[in-house]
């Protein structure tokens, strides 16, 4: 871990943005668990987990517009898989702390086989079209290196069945990396890592 990984969140989080993964939704079990915890323990925290459109450019525009009036100090972003890729883009744009879970690092490549009509995970009746031009939009969002002043927690599971943990680890090696033996892409044992995430965001002791 280098200087970036040693950066600490300077202020308790007052505004938290959660970005779900590809074909996912605000009904993601991780998003629902966080919302539940905040409602019970930190109801004053402003929580937003929007349904992201399939267009990457539209997704980024949506979240940047929706958080335009959020404070520079106290705001943070969190995301899983493709949402982790978006979260890093938002964090770099805004200078916010971020938490990423099994983040996509080359989604233009990895999502190429999915061009076409798809169904949503949490509502199979909701169908959408993932266009080839969206791959170009993703390639235009190539992430810059993590700033030495940027606080980032990366939770990466070696057992991820969809993404290569080595690529994730290489991309986020300057973050505060929690490299897990085993695990899976969805981070099914999310509950075991909740206290680490909340502590990083200064939401609990």
Image (cartoon, grey):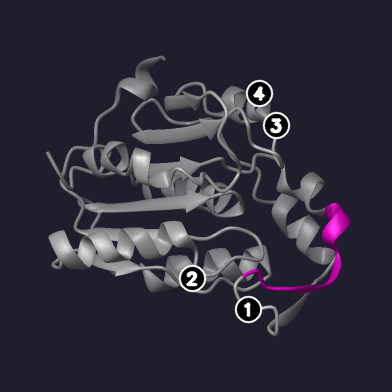
Is mark 3 in CB contact (under 8 Å) with mark 4? Answer: yes
Disc 2, SS:
loop
Region of the chain picked out in magenta, as a range: 112-121
Q: CA distance from mark 1 to mark 2?
A: 9 Å
Could you say whether the residue bearing mark 1 is in a helix, strand or loop?
Answer: loop
Q: Which residue is mark 4?
A: 166
Residue 63 in view here? yes
Residue at the bottom extreme, as displayed: 125
Residue 24: quarter of image? bottom right
Kindly identify which residue carries mark 3. Answer: 164
Give the label on residue 123, or none: 1
The N terminus sits in image quarter? top left
Residue at mark 3 to residue at mark 4: CA–CA distance:
5 Å
Q: CA distance from mark 4 to mark 1?
A: 32 Å
Asked if marks 1 and 2 touch (Cβ < 8 Å), the reply is yes
Query: Of the residues under marks 2 and 3, which one precedes in the sequence?
Result: 2
Disc on the earlier residue, 1 or 2: 2
Q: Residue 72: percent from the left, percent from the top?
A: 25, 53
Q: Where on the picture, by quarter, is residue 130? A: bottom right
Disc on res. 67: none
Residue found at x 46% / y 67%: 63
Please tell me whether residue 70 is drawn above or below residue 7 in the rendered image: below
Q: Secondary structure at mark 3?
A: loop
Q: Position of residue 52 (x, y in %)?
A: 56, 71
Between tags 4 and 1, which lies in front? 1
């Amino acid at each position: 871990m280098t200087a970036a990984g040693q950066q600490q969140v300077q202020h308790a989080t007052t505004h938290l943005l959660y970005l779900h993964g590809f074909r996912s939704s605000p009904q993601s079990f991780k998003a629902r668990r966080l919302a539940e915890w905040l409602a019970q323990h930190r109801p004053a925290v402003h929580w937003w987990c929007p349904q992201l459109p399939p267009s990457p450019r539209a997704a980024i525009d949506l979240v940047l517009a929706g958080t335009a009036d959020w404070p520079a100090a106290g705001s943070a972003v969190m995301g899983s898989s493709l949402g982790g890729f978006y979260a890093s883009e938002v964090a770099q744009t805004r200078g916010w702390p971020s938490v990423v879970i099994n983040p996509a690092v080359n989604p233009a490549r990895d999502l190429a086989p999915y061009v076409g009509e798809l169904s949503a995970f949490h509502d199979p009746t909701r169908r959408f079209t993932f266009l080839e031009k969206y791959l170009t939009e993703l390639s235009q969002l190539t992430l810059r290196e993590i700033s030495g002043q940027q606080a980032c927690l990366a939770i990466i599971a070696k057992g991820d069945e969809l993404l290569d943990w080595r690529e994730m680890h290489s991309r986020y090696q300057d973050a505060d990396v929690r490299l897990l033996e085993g695990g899976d892409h969805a981070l099914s044992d999310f509950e075991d890592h909740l206290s680490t995430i909340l502590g990083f965001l200064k939401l609990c002791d």
